[in-house]
């Protein structure tokens, strides 16, 4: 992916150079954050990601991996004081466009049952609940909802 921008925002491929900042952001976003080593391991094992900058500030990131049945969104994080400005939507939209262009058939993810903002975001793209993972999350313990999106229903990648 090449850099793309909208105003003072730009998307870039997540590389090891971003990991220190992404690790700090991960810790601010999640009660049970992944370590930088965990994120690096995901990238080393074929995972990929995107970071979103606004000016000089890295405001969000998306971490994914390919599955035999599609793509799994592993992490979507946005700087807490930058939320509700469309950054998560921009990251997801960019991913959906790329995956559709690459012929990916489906996208999967888990989301905390109580994360209503994320659930609304994903529902807006047509993700549907297809399962539940009891006690999946820690700190606090909570179920994960498994969501899926069939990209074949949206051949142009636009939502």
Image (spheres, rainbow, N blue to C red):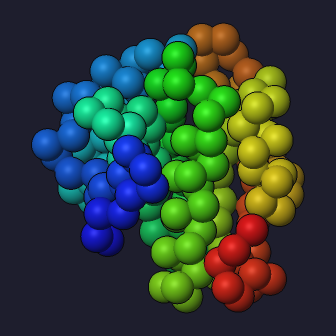
Name the residue: 29% across, 63% down.
3
- 102 left or right of 113 in image: left
Seen as rendered, the residue at the extreme front is 7
Name the residue: 44% across, 61% down.
65
Give the image quarter of residue 23.
top left
The relative height of residue 139 versus residue 88 in the rendered view (above or below) is above
Regarding residue 35, the answer to whether it shows in the image is no
Name the residue: 80% across, 24% down.
114
Q: Position of residue 131 (x, y in %)?
A: 82, 51
Regarding residue 155, the answer to whether it shows in the image is yes
The relative height of residue 116 versus residue 18 in the rendered view (above or below) is above
- 139 left or right of 153 in image: left
Q: Position of residue 149 (x, y in %)?
A: 75, 66
Quarter placement of the N terminus: bottom left
Name the residue: 22% across, 36% down.
19
- 26 left or right of 133 in image: left
Give the image quarter of residue 46.
bottom left
Q: Position of residue 90 (x, y in %)?
A: 56, 52
The number of discs equals 0
Quarter placement of the C terminus: bottom right
Q: Position of residue 15 (x, y in %)?
A: 21, 51
């Amino acid at each position: 992916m090449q850099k793309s921008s909208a105003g003072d925002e730009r998307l870039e491929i997540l590389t090891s150079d971003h990991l220190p900042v992404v690790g700090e952001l991960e810790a601010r976003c999640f009660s049970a954050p992944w370590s930088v080593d965990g994120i690096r391991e995901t990238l080393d094992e074929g995972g990929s990601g995107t970071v979103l900058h606004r000016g000089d500030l890295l405001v969000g990131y998306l971490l994914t991996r390919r599955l035999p049945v599609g793509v799994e969104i592993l992490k979507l994080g946005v700087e807490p004081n930058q939320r509700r400005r469309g950054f998560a939507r921009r990251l997801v939209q960019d991913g959906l466009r790329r995956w559709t262009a690459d012929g990916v058939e489906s996208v999967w993810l888990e989301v905390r049952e109580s994360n209503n903002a994320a659930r609304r975001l994903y529902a807006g793209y047509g993700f549907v609940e297809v399962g539940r993972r009891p006690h999946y999350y820690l700190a606090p313990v909570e179920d994960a909802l498994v969501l899926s999106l069939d990209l074949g229903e949206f051949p142009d990648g636009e939502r």
